[in-house]
Amino acid sequence: MKLKILRIAFILILVCFSAKGFSGPFKFLSAKPRLQDTVKFVSPYAEDNEKCLKCHGQERYEYKNETQDRQVRAIMCSERIVDRDLFYQSNHKTFSCTDCHSAEYESFPHPGELRMEPKLNCIDCHGGDETYAKYQFEAIDSEYVQSTHFKLQEDGFSCWKCHDPHTYKINNRTTENIKLTISYDNAICLSCHTDFNHFQLLSDREEINILKTHEWLPNQAAHFQSVRCIECHTKVNNNILVAHQIMPKKDAVRLCNDCHSQNSILMATLYKFQSKEQRRSGFFNGIILNESYVIGANRNEFLNLISFGILGLLFLGIGVHVFFRVRKSNQNN
Ligand code: HEC
Ligand code: HEC
Ligand code: HEC
Ligand code: HEC
Ligand code: HEC
Ligand code: HEC
Ligand code: HEC
């Protein structure tokens, strides 16, 4: 009997190890090297853009002081520097600077009234456009309008404050590396929430110490590397990929179980795209396990099957035993 159980258990283990698609901790077995994209984008406006980037592309710029007839060198403040590499990798890399900015910026000093120039918003270009339907700009816009930041709109808050016009690049749905997406997305929030100068431009509130307000979270550093701010601070929306309704702090996720359980909200937020794209057999929440070990959220289908199998064999063993006992006692009578 014991031998038989051992044999069956052994076969079950063999089956699950050789099962196609069984990855998780053994993913190195099936990891294939990915081709690197080595083609670099060359903008049709590269030359035009240099008219601006010769000053805005780095820290030092030069101009001619016509009145004194001399060449002047000066420092460009960091906020006004546009990084060429990041710009030519961004979503709007095919644009020329003057698609979004007035062509009058070509003259220097820039005419003062340009400061008052209104800027186009995402929805002005992307609203109602079939090509971008999958991003659901309208739905995102209506979430943003309900978000806690919207009250700062009059002080200058807009979609651009999180989506830097010169560097923003879709990440979540294109990346292979979840950790990079997490740090990309968190850097967006931290650009204000750990930089009081930026924060102050929009609010009179006292400085919020992020580390302090999240003291209740154990091993904060590990959590901030493994989850995004928006996981806890937005309302889950099944219809869009990235929820945009940042809620007031009292509604933020605080319950450990919201993530550390089998119906982890991470499957509806952080791993939403991946879990839709690739169903990994074996693990119920395979995609979570591939990236990190979230206590409570990982369960393996095969291990479940094995334990069911063993349980079944146990009952079978007891049944057979009872059967012979009963027969023997009948024979004895
Ligand atoms: C000769 C150097 C030089 C060139 C060329 C130049 N800029 Fe500027 N730009 C500056 C400096 C210095 C400032 C900051 C002082 C100011 O606002 O005038 C500035 C400020 C700006 C601002 C911010 C204005 C604000 O509201 O604060 C924008 C936008 C801008 N430039 C866009 C452009 C664009 C677009 C081009 C190319 C068409 C361009 N610049 C070409 C030097 C330059
Ligand atoms: C897709 C539209 C778009 C393109 C393309 C674009 N910009 Fe901008 N730019 C903006 C917007 C919007 C703002 C204002 C951002 C804000 O309000 O936070 C801005 C702000 C700026 C500023 C002022 C930064 C500040 O914080 O004061 C400078 C300088 C600038 N852009 C230069 C450039 C240069 C140089 C290029 C070309 C290499 C360029 N921009 C291309 C949309 C664009
Ligand atoms: C001036 C018009 C304009 C504005 C304003 C604008 N976009 Fe775009 N956007 C475009 C165009 C045109 C493209 C396509 C560029 C291309 O294919 O090279 C694009 C591309 C994109 C893409 C990539 C789409 C893809 O499938 O590759 C995203 C994401 C995006 N924009 C988001 C935004 C967001 C977010 C904002 C506001 C913060 C914004 N855009 C503002 C015109 C605009
Ligand atoms: C508080 C910050 C914040 C604001 C404000 C914000 N976004 Fe986003 N948005 C994000 C983050 C974070 C992502 C995820 C970026 C990633 O990893 O691809 C994102 C992603 C997106 C995407 C890509 C979604 C996809 O399906 O891949 C679009 C489109 C977008 N935002 C549009 C907007 C528009 C339109 C507005 C203004 C109405 C806006 N966002 C305002 C933070 C913000
Ligand atoms: C595990 C969930 C979780 C994560 C991840 C998280 N937060 Fe929070 N956050 C909360 C909760 C819960 C509160 C409410 C704390 C309180 O009321 O004292 C909060 C409070 C805040 C507040 C308001 C603080 C105040 O005193 O007004 C800000 C701002 C904030 N978080 C920003 C962030 C940023 C930025 C990130 C990403 C680096 C982040 N949070 C990540 C759960 C989270
Ligand atoms: C451009 C700057 C900026 C960015 C980027 C930004 N925030 Fe904020 N956020 C603020 C300011 C300013 C306040 C304070 C609003 C006020 O006066 O009550 C705030 C408030 C908050 C609050 C507290 C709301 C409350 O109830 O007190 C939360 C939570 C928050 N932000 C989360 C986030 C998250 C998550 C992100 C990234 C997705 C983010 N913020 C990105 C500027 C920013
Ligand atoms: C927003 C989702 C989320 C919430 C809420 C959350 N966690 Fe986590 N937690 C994670 C993830 C993801 C990891 C995996 C980190 C890794 O290994 O990459 C983790 C890891 C951990 C770890 C292991 C940390 C380590 O040192 O490796 C502990 C312990 C933990 N969480 C406890 C808690 C407790 C207690 C709470 C409630 C106060 C909580 N978590 C709330 C997502 C969450």
Image (cartoon, helix red, strand yellow):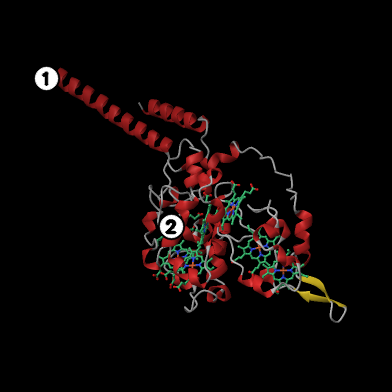
Quarter of the image for the N terminus: give it.
top left
Residue 57 vs 133, above or below: the answer is: below
Q: Position of residue 325 (x, y in %)?
A: 21, 24
Which residue is rendered at x = 45% and y = 66% of the image?
150
**Crowd around label 2: few <14 · some 14–19 · many ≥20 (10 Å):** some
Q: Which residue sits furthest top?
A: 331
Query: Three-letter amino acid code at disc 2?
Result: Glu
To which residue does mark 1 refer? 333
Q: CA distance from mark 1 to mark 2?
A: 80 Å
- Tell me which numbered mark, 1 or 2, is placed earlier along the sequence: 2
Q: Position of residue 64 (x, y in %)?
A: 84, 74
> Does the residue tagged 2 have its C-beta within 8 Å of any atom of ligand 4?
yes
State the residue at coordinates (43%, 49%). Answer: 268
Question: In the image, what residue type sits under mark 1?
Answer: Asn
Residue drawn 53% across and 73% down?
A: 199
Vertical relation: 191 (above or below) 10: below
Pointer 2: what residue?
Answer: 143
